[in-house]
Image (cartoon, rainbow, N blue to C red):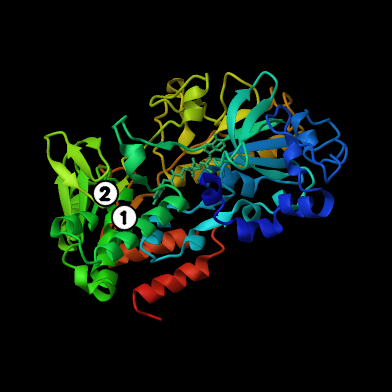
Amino acid sequence: MVWFRSFIHVSSSIGSSSIKHRYLNKSPPNYFLSISLSQHFSTESTFHKTPSPDDNPYSGLCRATKPSEKPRMVVLGSGWAGCRIMKDIDTTIYDVVCVSPRNHMVFTPLLASTCVGTLEFRSIAEPVASIQPAISREPGSFFLPAHCKVLDTDNHQVHCETVTDDEKTLKPWNFTISYDKLVIAAGAEASTFGIHGVTEHAIFLREVHHAQAIRRKLLLNLMLSDVPGLSEEEKRRLLHCVVVGGGPTGVEFSGELSDFILKDVHLRYAHVKDYIHVTLIEANEILSSFDDRLRHYATKQLTKSGVRLVRGVVKDVQLQKIILNDGTEVPYGLLVWSTGVGPSALTRSLQFPKSPGGRIGVDEWLRIPSVQDVFAIGDCCGFLESTGKPVLPALAQVAERQGKYLGNLLNKIGKGGGGHANRAREMELGPPFVYTHLGSMATVGSFKALVDLRQSKEAKGLSLTGFVSWFIWRSAYLTRPYLKQNLRIVGSFLRMVGMS
Ligand SMILES: Cc1cc2nc3c(=O)[nH]c(=O)nc-3n(C[C@H](O)[C@H](O)[C@H](O)COP(=O)(O)OP(=O)(O)OC[C@H]3O[C@@H](n4cnc5c(N)ncnc54)[C@H](O)[C@@H]3O)c2cc1C
């Protein structure tokens, strides 16, 4: 079940979460269900009296806040951008309601390391309620497991649908939330370029449940390939790991896989070690955002560790093979798809002016200029052409800094009395959001990485390769303020390099 996979951290987070707390202490079991306004779901129960709206802390969410109440900030999404603003927002000024299909933030730069067991899944996921504890404690702050489906900016409302895909036990239901300030931080979607079969047969690498699926498939194929009765050809197919997309994610995952093969497979699956291979397919150059020198280094390192680099365009994806444009058939046992991101279904459905590339268009203060009190941050947004600024890359460092900037801006607006709906029209907002690129990094396996600290690949400045870069790469992520699991991660890395 998708919702259950997305709630990977629920056991640790929900112990302190608002929903369980209120559910257990104040309400009957159907209590949470009664937040819905326009439902296809009955809240009738033979065992429990349906609570009156006055008892129900959720029922107030659909109406506008009163001037005597805290203004309500609704955040759509619990990724880099959404979690950063939730972390920084002053909860003495605002109530925070987070609507997202997952109850945790994923520390994406380390996701590839979890696919092969270098890191554990729980090390890279942080519960929303731990990033912003008010969500567990404050009576008007909540995490709601749902997708936003429709925005009604005229009435300052969002219409949402709960997450569930198990139609047999629980149908999704709809509910509405009123906002004073709305922050859209709903990210982007993996691009498939409409290629047939990608969604059905390939695994993306964007969520913890994707990494779990990759690990499960890899281990299953390794074990199956040792079972008697399998032809040589089938054994080679099962153990052929194909990665499509030579950007940082595809390269990092290929590097992790080759490390796994050289260490774990050679040690623990010695019978089949000569059958397992990694192929990385890319239509152009790998790591095209890096300069020639760094790219050549990456190519050399990957080839040295056994990754086969293939220049090609995928035309069709079938159950056990992919077909390239030139007709070449590539059989696979594991197929990981990592060809970048594009606008999500929510972004595509919104009628606001868009930035080049189809993202939600924002001005220099990250506002959607055509409506009041609505902001967008992270991968889902881009500067409108009229700002004269370029669309920023889909990167965690952009999303996080936009979240930080907007948190400060909304705190300032709230302190100045503009927190409630339509109260900030005439307010002086101060300096606009300015992005300075801190550099790009990518690991290529075998404790090697590329670090480019220049503003762009043409600019002057420092760029490094090798172990020192790998060390910088790892250390940079361990300084981020979200992960409470840093010690666990440091322990894993020390074990990797043989220091503990
Ligand atoms: C494997 C991998 C490695 C990466 N490595 C790096 C790196 O090393 N450095 C770097 O800078 N960047 C990296 N990135 C990119 C970085 O992760 C993204 O740029 C960043 O996650 C964008 O943050 P965001 O908050 O905009 O979106 P996301 O982090 O994608 O979060 C979007 C959130 O919105 C939720 N959502 C989706 N639809 C809806 C809806 N309809 N309603 C409500 N909520 C919704 C999602 O569930 C999610 O919680 C990597 C990405 C991946 C996948």
Q: Please state the horizontal and vertical placement of residue 364, each as a whole percent of the image.
A: 52, 29
Label 2 sits on residue: 243
| On screen, residue 30 above or below 382 | below
Residue 372 picture quarter:
top right
In the image, 260 versus 222, the foreground residue is: 222
Q: Is mark 1 within 8 Å of ligand 1?
A: yes
Mark 2 neighbour class, 10 Å CA radius: few under 14, some 14 to 19, many 20 or more: many
- Secondary-structure class at tag 1: helix
Q: Is residue 56 above or below residue 113?
A: above
Q: Residue at x 20, y 68 (%)?
A: 273
Verify CB contact (< 8 Å) between mark 2 and mark 1: yes
Q: Does residue 361 show up?
A: yes
Q: Is mark 2 within 8 Å of ligand 1?
A: no
Residue 89, by quadrant, is top right
Of the image marks 2 and 1, the number of the one nearer the N terminus: 2
Q: Identity of the amino acid at label 1?
A: Phe
Give the residue at mark 1. Answer: 253
Residue appearing at x 57%, y 63% in the figure = 484
Front: mark 2 or 1: 2
Location of residue 471 in the rendering, given as x and y in whole percent from the top left corner: 35, 66
Give the amino acid type for the residue marked by disc 2 in the picture. Val
Relative to 163, 95 lies left or right: right
- Residue farthest to the front, as pictured: 229
Kindly state the secondary structure of the residue where label 2 is placed. Answer: strand
Residue 96, numbered circle: none
Q: Is residue 446 visible?
A: no
